[in-house]
Image (cartoon, rainbow, N blue to C red):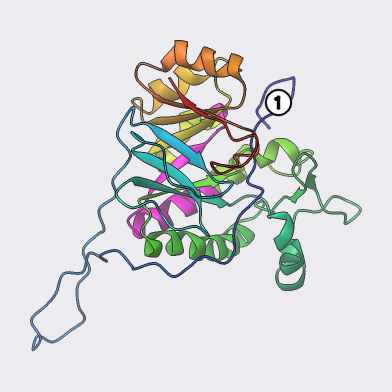
Amino acid sequence: MSEHAVPPFLRRRGTLAGLAGGVAVATGAGLLLSNAFASGPVAKAAPEVVPPRANVTFDYQIGGAYTPPPGVGAVSRDRGDEPAEGLYNVCYVNAFQTQPDALDRWQKNNPDLLLRDGDGDLVNDEDWGEALLDTSTAGKRTRLAEIVGKWVDGCATSGFQAVEPDNLDSFERSHGLLTREHNAAFAKLLADRAHAAGLAIGQKNTTGLLGRRDAIGFDFAVAEECGRYDECADYATAYGDRVFVVEYSDRDFTKACTSVGAAVSVVRRDLDVRPAGRPGHVFRTC
């Protein structure tokens, strides 16, 4: 949810996070090769982190990968899908909530990392059927960062150039059990992990954390429904137009195009982000 008094009815959550992706050819690891006869460990150079360029035509494919339309230069896909060859690829990771089909594994392997209320019941994002992860302590954030961090590393190995950790705003659905500070601290751990893997990292929604973008380490933004709430210019200003805007209605798409479409990537998608060829698929750009 956004931080507005009236909750959004369209803001997209990942519902199709594939857990079984094919093994991709790993990208270059940025190793500095030492002489074969030199003693000591091989030195590593810091991998290059490349943020997206402003106003590149963007497609949002987290509901299933398909051949990008002509002219598209950047795409966001689920971490279980392969990146699109020759494009700037953003890897979708549901970092602050569980995928519905993964809840049993969380309950079996890490039940204490699921947020629970005073009665011991799971705290859920009711709109998308996702349990919230518990970022409330440093110890739990560290453990979560090890789990989610492996997914981030997998994005890099698969050949993505960036990652977007979704549900940064889960604290707004936590009934006061989580705070902005909790999620910002967890996001910082993820940003460090992404940069260490050579990935740029995008802020997903949540204008209330724009002021902390540098401290966290965000490199760009993915903003859903900013046209609806007149937030697009805020993201564009904060990130030097390195923003991917996703709208789910014609009216909000028109508002976003009018507001920032000359400088920022804006795409109109259907709410279920269906692959091309499926009934109900929508793809438009300004």
Queried whether the magenta region covers residue 198, the answer comes back as: yes
Q: Is mark 1 on a helix, strand or loop?
A: loop
Quadrant where the N terminus is found in the figure: top right
Residue visible at 36% across and 36% down in the picture: 70
Residue 221 located left or right of residue 249: left
Where 92 sits versus 246, above or below?
Answer: below
Q: Where is residue 12 in the image (x, y as percent from the top left)?
A: 64, 36
Q: Image quadrant of residue 106?
A: bottom right
Would you name the residue on which mark 1 appears?
8
Q: Where is residue 50 in the image (x, y as percent from the top left)?
A: 28, 45
Residue 45 located left or right of residue 113: left
Q: Magenta part of the protein: which range?
A: 186-208
Residue visible at 74% across and 38% down in the picture: 173
Where 266 sits versus 38, above or below?
Answer: above
Residue visible at 44% across and 70% down in the picture: 23
Quadrant where the C terminus is found in the figure: top left
Q: Image quadrant of residue 52?
A: top left
How crowded pointer 1 is (Cα within 10 Å; few <14, some 14-19, many 20+) is rated as some
Residue 72 located left or right of residue 45: right
Amino acid type, label 1: Pro
Where 162 sits versus 139, above or below?
Answer: above
